[in-house]
Amino acid sequence: MNPLVGIIMGSDSDLNVMQAASDILKQFDIPHEVTVVSAHRTPHRMIEYAATAKDRGLKVIIAGAGGAAHLPGMVASVTVLPVIGVPIKSSNSIDGWDSVLSILQMPNGVPVGTVALNASKNAGILAAEILGTSDEAVSQKVTEYKNSLNNEVIEKVEKMKRDGWENKFD
């Protein structure tokens, strides 16, 4: 199947963070592609990637970037697809705040959905939820996933009831 989600990042050093988006999309059986597209080092590649994404069949783009984190916003400026930004705490980052604010504070007219710092798993889930609005099979998988989260918490509650809260850290 052709990819429905594009996962891009400014550097291959971001892959350790962005891997979680790919993993959750695999769990939902959503075809996707993963590549490096740097807003600063490969601006022509970035423009081509974003401008052709819809015609290539993509429905959502997840863009991770650290430092100045221009990639998600610049991609959003060149495509009509929803872009989900993942701020990454990189080696040149100011505790990740520069990345968070660079992605979060987009000007009106160029929205970028932004998840928490290093939270590419959430970006993958959000991409699946977006796809699920028009694909019932994907929606069902997201529903099952969310039900599993609920069940995990209930199991922990039962364990605490059974073992006592005093022993929860054993």
Image (cartoon, rainbow, N blue to C red):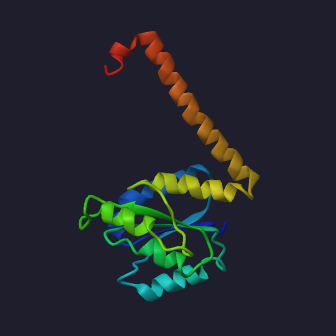
Residue 151 visible in the picture: yes
Q: Pick the residue in front: 30 or 110.
A: 110
Q: Pick the residue in front: 23 or 124.
A: 124
Which residue occupies 37% across, 71% down?
69
Which residue occupies 42% across, 86% down?
43
List x then y, in percent, for residue 23: 50, 53
Locate residue 53: give its quadrant: bottom right
Q: Is residue 157 above or below residue 9?
A: above
Query: Quick one: which residue is furthest to the bottom in this view?
Result: 44
Which quadrant is the N terminus positioned in?
bottom right
Locate residue 36: give its quadrant: bottom left
Residue 64 visible in the picture: no
List x then y, in percent, for residue 146: 60, 40
Which residue occupies 63% across, 66% down?
4
List x then y, in percent, for residue 16: 36, 58
Left or right: where 132 falls relative to 75: right
Q: Is residue 122 above or below residue 144?
A: below
Which quadrant is the C terminus positioned in?
top left
Left or right: where 53 falls relative to 168: right
